[in-house]
Image (cartoon, rainbow, N blue to C red):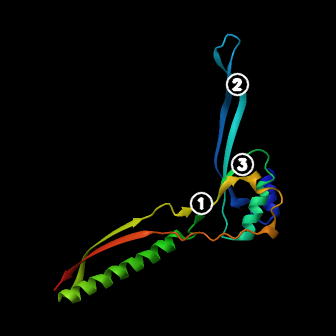
Amino acid sequence: MEFKKQLLLKGFNEKDLKTVSFNINTNYENYKDNNGNYKKRFLGYKYSHSMKLSFRLNDSKLVDVLTSLNTIKGNVNFYLDYKIEDTEKFKNELLIKAIENTKNKAEILANTSGVTLEKIININYSFNEPNNFISPFRGENKILGAKMSSDSLLTINPEDLKFKDTVTITWEIK
């Protein structure tokens, strides 16, 4: 596979490129016979090979990938996804901030109401995780053209990802 070979030449590891799905289907065309009846003619087989290449945000590497796409014969659809690299670390940091925020607001309400927060009776937590990716660019590889090189470096700055975390804490009050 020329694409894979090009990626290896540009410094990617073989394990970076993963097959997500591989499908083979029959391919027919519809036609009218001499009597005007519609019929199907077997043309062969079509396959679809979906792959995923993961790497840290790096515009130069992105150009390497896009220029490597030009080595693939036929139509290639592709898209870029930006994801959070360490989602567990991110969720933990978000949870800490949500609890701090909840506690701060509860203390304001308690002080304003003239009561004191005592021990926690209940904690209810709900993490709302939307699709944690954005796809700023979709297209076919031939659109880019063979002239793209690292000299024509793309600069892509992904949009901030937005998450919502809800923590409800019930305190005993005095």
Q: What's the mark number on residue 76?
A: 3
Residue at horizontal 71%, vertical 11%?
34
The Cα–Cα distance between marks 3 and 2, rounded to whole angstroms, is 24 Å
Q: Position of residue 87 (x, y in %)?
A: 52, 69
Q: Is residue 12 visible?
A: no
Amino acid type, callout 3? Val
Quadrant assignment, res 106:
bottom left
The Cα–Cα distance between marks 1 and 2, rounded to whole angstroms, is 37 Å
Q: Position of residue 73 (x, y in %)?
A: 80, 46
Q: Is residue 106 visible?
A: yes
Amino acid type, callout 1? Ser
Q: Quadrant of the C terminus?
A: bottom left
Direction from residue 142 to residue 126 in the image, left or right = left
Q: How many residues crowd mark 3 within 10 Å: few (<14), some (14–19), many (20+)? A: some
Q: Position of residue 56 (x, y in %)?
A: 66, 70
Instruction: Provide the residue designation for mark 2.
Output: 42
Residue at horizontal 70%, vertical 36%?
46
Instruction: Provide the residue designation for mark 1.
Output: 135
Q: Mark 2 falls on what kind of element?
A: strand
Residue 165 against residue 17 in the figure, above or below:
below
Quadrant assignment, res 7:
bottom right
Q: How many residues crowd mark 2 within 10 Å: few (<14), some (14–19), many (20+)? A: few
Q: Mark 3 falls on what kind of element?
A: loop
